[in-house]
Amino acid sequence: MNAYLNLLIGLAIGLNLLALGSSRLPSLINAVAVQGMALGAMPFLLEEHINWMVALVACATVAVKGFVIPILLRRAMRTANIEREVVPSIGYVPSLLLGAGGTIAAVAFARTLPLLPEHAGSLLVPGSLASVLTGFVLLIGRSKAISQVCGYLILENGIYLFGLLLIHATPLLVEAGILLDLTVGVFVIGIIVDRIQRAFDSLDTRKLTVLRE
Amino acid sequence: MKALLLVLLPLAGAALAAVWPSDRTRPWLLPVVGVLHVALSLWLLFVPPPFASTAWFAFDPLARAVLPAVSLLFLACAAYAVPYLGVRAERSNRVFVATFLAVLGLLSAGHGARHLGLLWIATEGVTLAAVPLIHFNGTSRAFEATWKYLLVGGTGIALSLLGSFALGYASLYGGGSGDLTVAALASQGAKLSHPWVLAAWVLLLAGYGTKMGLAPMHTWKPDAYGEAPGIVGALLAGGVTTVAFTAVLRVREVVAASGSGAIADRTLLAIGLFSMLVSALFLLGTRDFKRMLAYSSVEHMGILAVGAALGAAGVYAALFHVWGNSLTKGALFLSAGNIRRAAGARTMDEVSGMSAITPHSAAIFITGMFAVTALPPFGPFFSELGIVRAAFGADRPGTAAMFLGCLLFVFFGLTRLVFAIVDGRPRAASRVTGQRFPETMSVIVPPLVLLGFSLWLGLATPAVLTEAWAGAVAQLFPTP
């Protein structure tokens, strides 16, 4: 069971690197979508007895992260009529190096953390830290609003991975609330992206520099 | 049950506002819900309801000590919103009214949340519900501010979720159940895993500190407060920051119970003094009087953090300061809104002589500025005095000196800008816009009432409030 889980987390880490290295927005959005679906499926591997509430939240996660959010992002991308990130503030090779270095550091760091025996062999903690780091690199290193949103989603995915450590303790009501907040959040971001596109005729956040001291 | 009404009532009002047909009558829902909310929260203040310590949501002593202040502030903003939305009749107020009410409901939920997951959901909900309020003006500057608010605020709030999970894992590792209610975590005490508690504290302080607007996570604040309408700024500065502060206090309670209280206090002290210093420096430089209010808010969040770091006496003074800050800042934001509309601009390069165009608002603005810089006998003077005394009581004269030094620079910064705007000869452009947006009683009375409350707090602090603050301190510092 743990082996399958680690395989999925390995896939998520690989998708982190794919997201860091891709210059085209559609492939970035696809990476985030596949990662979200992989994460959503994990509760089925973690729980021995699947009750209908767990199944419901897991299915909702797959649906939201794998389909709803990517559709919203693709629509924003089409209305803005942009396909690729032209000049990122942190280039693709440096981003990849940062991501790879960060992943190695996350694995090394997770070994030093006090973990319960049942979590010691799993990649949950290093995968979570690596995803949070990847999210930050994308948030800082990309200038198109949609790429930054993808960075934010990968950051959220990292936090979700960490939350899986507590899957037996966290009430599902809380999980559902968090998922709802995330969906509404991306929906709101989608609206703002659309308005920024109309107001500035661009989604380049480097143009948002009127407000400063 | 009554406590739950504090959440459900505004949310029901929000749903009603979303389907209300008329733009002209819809804003009246705000004061109606506001009056009911104030009545309910004052009732609960005077007759505290019993609550189970394991409850996820309750009107516990901490909620009782701060939520009525937010409720009063909301009522003043709601009363002001009716004439304000009247002059902004060119755009639909459906989304504005609905989300304004939703923010109140989620704020109430956040104040009473005793479960870290519920607390996070409520705070994130407030963050998202405030988005349409910030870009109500619809200018490109407003969208820029909203984007920065969403990105910085969203990342911060995500970190606090990670921190909440880390605290849950500290409980699991210590042999607990991973239950995220504050009571269950605190009762585990020293059994909580020490490294995980510290990691959780850093993440939660960064996360909720972003919502409070503590430096260096304050960068969204000047933009959002500067571009949002005055009532929105008032609610953000007096309500949203307050819920984040109660979150920090609740987490601090758990960290202290685990035996790391001294570390938590040191970080709070450092980040609080740093926020005061940063705001003082920016206040000496800014030329925009709405951004000035944002930096002043950063300063007051720093004051709260310093108070929270100084033990029971400091927390008592900080709770007092929450009231002083919410009510006085509300008066400042509302009067600044009047001045901004009449002047048609907001920097000291374009605005002067507003005491001739909007005499009442200018008077409230100046008085509020003196109140917020701790002039006796207003409330903030006594609460800040309490914090200085707590600093000396905790044998930290250096902290007290730095605290007072920052207050002095903030005073210079504020007076410089406020008098430049109020004094002198009115600009020609302002004379024209001033006639278009004259001061009416309906926009003067709400800030005046808030200022009156601030004065009342200082002159004769009601006994029920001192008792409520003492009750909250007793909850946060349990005597074994």
Image (cartoon, rainbow, N blue to C red):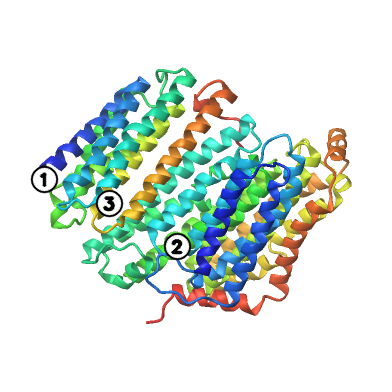
- Quadrant of the image occupied by residue B165: bottom left
Residue labelled with disc 1: A1
Count of marks, rendered view = 3
Q: Residues within 10 Å of mark 2 (few under 14, many from 20)?
A: many
Looking at the figure, which quarter contains the C terminus of chain B? bottom left
Q: Secondary structure at mark 2?
A: loop
Q: Is residue B288 depicted above or below B81 in this figure?
A: above
Discs 2, 3 touching: Cβ within 8 Å: no
Q: Is residue B429 depicted above or below B244 in this figure?
A: above
Q: Secondary structure at mark 1?
A: loop
Residue B383: horizontal and vertical position, in percent? 62, 69
Q: Chain of mark 1?
A: A
Pick whichever, A18 or B277, lies toward us.
A18
Residue B89: horizontal and vertical position, in percent? 74, 38
Give the residue displayed 51% in from the left and 55% down from the top.
B106
Q: Chain of mark 3?
A: A
Q: Is residue B275 depicted above or below A39 in this figure?
A: below
Q: Are marks 1 and 3 on the same chain?
A: yes
In this rendering, which labeled residue sits more in front, label 1 or label 3? 3
Q: Residues within 10 Å of mark 1 (few under 14, many from 20)?
A: few
Q: Are marks 2 and 3 on the same chain?
A: no
Q: In the rendered view, does A108 fall on the left or right side of B37?
A: left
The residues tagged by marks 2 and 3 sit, at their Cα atoms, a distance apart of 23 Å
The mark found on residue A53 in the picture is 3
Query: Which residue occupies the extreme bottom position in the image?
Result: B480
Give the residue displayed 72% in from the left and 71% down from the top.
B456
Question: What's under tag 3, amino acid-wise?
Answer: Met
Question: What's under tag 2, amino acid-wise?
Answer: Ala
Residue B173: horizontal and vertical position, in percent? 22, 62
Residue labelled with disc 2: B113
| Mark found first going from the N terminus, 1 or 3 | 1
Residue B97: horizontal and vertical position, in percent? 63, 46
